[in-house]
Image (cartoon, rainbow, N blue to C red):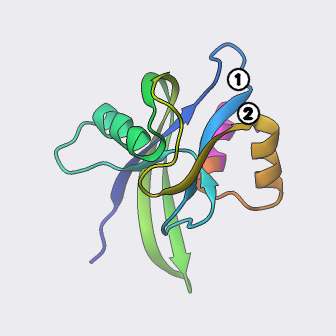
Amino acid sequence: MKAVVPGVSAIIVDNVRKIEKIVMVQREHEPWKGKWVIPGGRIEFGEKIYTALKREVYEETNLRIRILSHVCTFDLIIYNNKQPVYHFIIINYLAYPVGGKLKAGSDASDAKWMSIKEVKDLINKSMAPKILKIPLRKLNLI
């Protein structure tokens, strides 16, 4: 039996008052291998949500963050031949960097600041997964 996996993700912004860029990572492994997404990952057993978020962001981007607010929580089920292969519950937060230098880390082949226009272009070309679209819509960024 497969289990539901709790996860966290962060929309890391360049400017809290006027968001022009967000941190994006290119996934090195499945799910979403090769796709650009916001940083995040699984919550480990016994780990608190904020601790997991800060750990995942640091592992993928080398950035230390301050968490500002909860954006949304959603479930995401990925199917293959009409059969569920992944089931995530994603808790998403808005954050900004307070330390570190942006670079790709574990599970990321690349990491960079992307303008909102660049992110919209990815989405319009159907090159962005739902894990990116849902929280950005909640913030009215796309």
Disc 1 is placed on an element classified as: loop
Q: Residue furthest bottom?
A: 81
At label 1, which amino acid type do we have? Ile
Return the residue nearer the eye: 121 or 88. 121
Identify the image quadrant of the N terminus.
bottom left
List the residue tagged with mark 2.
141
Q: x, y percentage for residue 39?
A: 50, 45
Return the residue nearer the eye: 133 or 19. 19
Q: Residue at x 45, y 46 (%)?
A: 60
Asked if the residues shown at circle 2 and circle 1 are in contact, with their CB atoms under 8 angstroms apart, the answer is: yes
- Secondary structure that dominates the magenta span: helix
Count of picture labels: 2
Please tell me whether residue 90 is drawn above or below residue 18 in the rendered image: below
The Cα atoms of the two marked residues, 2 and 1, are separated by: 8 Å
Residue 19 image label: 1
Q: Residue at x 44, y 24 (%)?
A: 67
Tell me if residue 8 is in the magenta stretch: no
Q: x, y percentage for residue 38?
A: 57, 45
Return the residue nearer the eye: 25 or 86. 25
- Residue 141: which quarter of the image? top right
Identify the image quadrant of the C terminus.
top right
Q: Residue at x 77, y 53 (%)?
A: 122
The magenta-colored residue range is 133-142
Looking at the image, residue 23 sits to the left or right of residue 55; the answer is right
Disc 2 is placed on an element classified as: loop
Q: x, y percentage for residue 90?
A: 45, 48
Tell me if residue 139 is in the magenta stretch: yes
Q: Comparing marks 2 and 1, which lies closer to the viewer?
A: 1
